[in-house]
Image: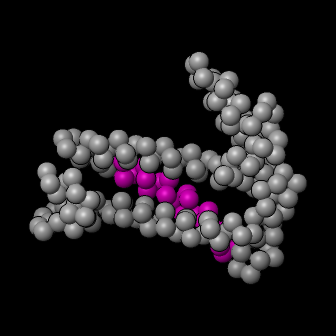
Amino acid sequence: EAIVRNLWLHWFPNKVTVRSASWSYSLWLGAVTASLFLILLVTGVLLMFFYVPSVEKAYWSMKDIQFAVSFGWLLRNQHRWAAHLMVATTFLHMARVFFTGAYRGPRSLNWLVGLALLLATLLLSFTGYLLPWDQLAYWAVTVGTNIAREAPFVGESMRFLLLGGTTIVQATLLRFYV
């Protein structure tokens, strides 16, 4: 239990069974997801230097990143593919934990943290999907905020908070960018 509660000892225990270290048992999905997160962090910070979160300029700044910035196409595609892969590996990691029963016992708090991280991954992926601010993004915002509006009791307030008002405007793009 001390090893499970201590993150350092959990990652680097004194003894490791051959079965738990095998590729076929864990597929190293947690490490792959963490690596993808680091890629997203680095490429996201670099993309922040070139992206302009403005309704008038967002689409064209994406085009500039792709076609005018040196290796911008590579940077944007690395970020995009890492985001897609992170959603997939996070889901697969959580499925593996669930199907092997690794969420039981003293690791139940880890399971709840993992669920929160899965939800955060999905929400951040959605916000990144909207940043090109083209027709696809506009209608994704419309659908996403209308889904949020259907939540009982807090739906209208949540939609208002997400949009920054009652319509899709500059404040909406800025909120999803932040």
Q: Residue at x 82, y 46 (%)?
A: 170
**Residue 23 vs residue 74: left or right?**
left
Indicate the position of residue 152 as horizontal and vertical percent values: 57, 19
Q: Main secondary structure of the magenta part?
A: helix
Q: Residue at x 44, y 48 (%)?
A: 117
Q: Is residue 176 above or below residue 34?
A: above
Q: Pick the residue in front: 6 or 106.
A: 6
Q: Residue at x 40, y 43 (%)?
A: 115
| Stretch of the chain drawn in magenta | 73-94
**Residue 44 vs residue 2: left or right?**
right
Q: Residue furthest top?
A: 153
Magenta-span inclusion, residue 93: yes
Is any atom of residue 129 visible in this view?
no
Is any atom of residue 165 visible in this view?
yes
Query: Splitting the image into 4 quarters, where does residue 165 fall?
Result: top right
Magenta-span inclusion, residue 31: no
**Residue 115 vs residue 21: left or right?**
right
Q: Pick the residue in front: 34 or 157.
A: 157
Indicate the position of residue 99 as horizontal and vertical percent values: 28, 44
Q: Is residue 161 above or below residue 78?
A: above
- The number of discs equals 0
Indicate the position of residue 151 as horizontal and vertical percent values: 59, 23
Q: Is residue 1 above or below residue 62?
A: above
Query: Splitting the image into 4 quarters, where does residue 106 fall?
Result: top left
